[in-house]
């Protein structure tokens, strides 16, 4: 099932996840993205840059989508996602396509999607220290697409009124919102994630609607830890246990 370069981790919702030891592993940002998705059991979803497939598998397990297409440019990582779908008996609901998202069209997934979601690379191709591991560089840096490319792909894939969910870095929020609006994706809900009450936000979650009317709600911030401790806040514990956010209704 696995080789010497891999390991199997047991994560939320009783999922088992094959991961490359020298690649990026399942983290808070991926789980929060899966929790932020609004449940629509009959929907077809697409994950842009699906990596090991964990967000898609969580979405399927929590019945937030009936089928998900995962787009992953790295064939070796795409194959891990396929194996993870089989390991968790979800291969009939999760289709992994190894392609550059800048080339993907709705016809590649059999028609328009109801929802698209992504945990895109946070760093520009020319910023930060490059890692000697190419897979990590591609996952962290905008080598195969900038944020506008992700938004443009979501626009091509979504049906009118469909939703796009993104987890991103607050210091690049202006670029994200500009890219969304440039692609007719109207921001509808924004939530900042903080380590605790003493720290600035380290992540943001945003949902946008293709062709939506103007108007965005900013949710109360989410604090992961109680101040000065490693203990989860009650609010984050509920998100972690249920894989949902409170107040999910979106206009």
Image (tube, rainbow, N blue to C red):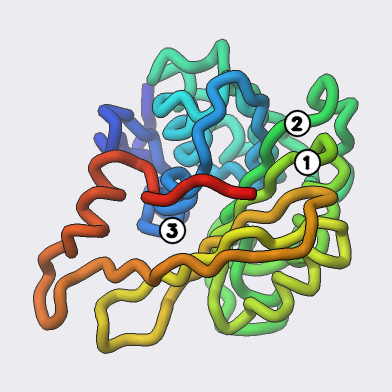
Spatial separation of the CA atoms under disc 1 and disc 2: 10 Å
Spatial separation of the CA atoms under disc 3 and disc 1: 25 Å
Q: Which residue is mark 2?
A: 113
Q: Residue 31 at x, y = what percent?
A: 40, 49
Q: Residue 8 at x, y = what percent?
A: 30, 34
Instruction: Check the image and report above or below for 28 versus 56.
Output: below
Residue at 46% from the left image edge and 66% from the top image edge: 219
Q: Residue 62 at x, y = what percent?
A: 41, 28
Which mark is on residue 153? none
Q: Residue 218 at x, y = what percent?
A: 53, 69
Q: How many marks?
A: 3
**Which is nearer the N-term, disc 1 or disc 2?**
2
Q: Which residue is mark 3?
A: 29
Residue at 77% from the left image edge and 66% from the top image edge: 146
Give residue 10's quadrant in the image: top left
Camera-near label (2 vs 3) is: 2
At mark 3, the secondary structure is helix
Instruction: Check the image and report above or below for 130 versus 181.
Output: below
Residue at 24% from the left image edge and 59% from the top image edge: 235
**Which is nearer the N-term, disc 3 or disc 1?**
3
Q: Which residue is mark 1?
A: 161
């Amino acid at each position: 099932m696995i080789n010497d370069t891999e390991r199997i981790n047991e994560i939320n919702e009783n999922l088992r996840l094959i991961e490359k030891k020298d690649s990026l592993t399942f983290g808070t940002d991926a789980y929060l993205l899966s929790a932020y998705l609004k449940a629509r059991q009959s929907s077809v979803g697409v994950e842009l840059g699906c990596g090991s497939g964990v967000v898609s598998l969580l979405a399927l397990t929590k019945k937030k989508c009936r089928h998900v297409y995962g787009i992953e440019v790295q064939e070796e990582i795409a194959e891990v996602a396929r194996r993870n779908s089989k390991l968790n008996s979800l291969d009939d609901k999760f289709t992994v396509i190894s392609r550059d998202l800048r080339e993907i069209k709705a016809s590649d997934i059999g028609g328009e999607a109801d929802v698209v979601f992504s945990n895109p690379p946070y760093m520009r191709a020319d910023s930060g220290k490059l890692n000697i591991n190419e897979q990590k560089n591609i996952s962290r840096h905008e080598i195969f697409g900038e944020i506008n490319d992700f938004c443009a792909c979501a626009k091509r894939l979504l049906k009118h009124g469909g939703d796009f969910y993104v987890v991103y870095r607050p210091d690049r929020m202006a670029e994200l919102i500009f890219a969304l609006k440039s692609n007719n994706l109207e921001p509808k809900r924004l939530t900042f994630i903080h380590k605790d009450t003493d720290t600035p936000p380290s992540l943001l979650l945003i949902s946008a609607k293709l062709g939506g009317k103007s108007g965005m709600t900013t949710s109360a911030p989410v604090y992961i830890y109680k101040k000065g401790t490693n203990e989860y806040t009650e609010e984050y514990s509920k998100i972690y246990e249920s894989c949902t956010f409170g107040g999910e209704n979106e206009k």
